[in-house]
Image: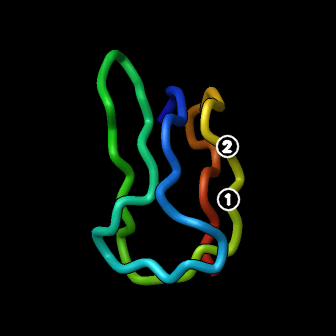
Amino acid sequence: MPGLLTKIAVKVGEAVTAGQKLASIAAMKMENTLSAMQDGVVAEICAKEGDSLAVEQLIIRFE
């Protein structure tokens, strides 16, 4: 989703569970929360807080 990446709530190597908050994006004057769809481990964070995101831009990659 396009918008401004305002917060990343996980770190590389961190195990996450389904439903856990991953990041927040400000778009269209609203704050949107991205949550994990399933359990996994964060392999890479591909964007940083403050980045303007393009549609379908990769933010977090999982192992």
Circle count: 2
Which quadrant would residue 18 be assigned to in this image? bottom left
x and y percentages locating residue 1 in the rendered image? 47, 36
Mark on residue 34? none
Q: Which of 24 and 36 is in front in this view?
A: 24
Where's residue 40, x and y in %? Answer: 49, 82
Rounded to the nearest angstrom, the CA distance separating label 1 from label 2 is 8 Å
Q: Which residue is outermost to the top?
A: 29
Asked if the residue under mark 2 is in contact with the one under mark 1, i.e. CB atoms within 8 Å, the reply is yes
Going 39% across and 67% down the picture, which residue do you hit?
A: 36
Judge from the rendering whether residue 60 lies leftward or rightward of residue 33; answer left or right.
right
**Residue for badge 2:** 48
Residue at 50%, 35% (x, y): give it.
Answer: 6
The residue that mark 1 highlights is 45
Where is the C terminus found, in terms of image quarters?
Answer: bottom right
Judge by depth and name the residue closer to the eye, 36 or 15. Answer: 15
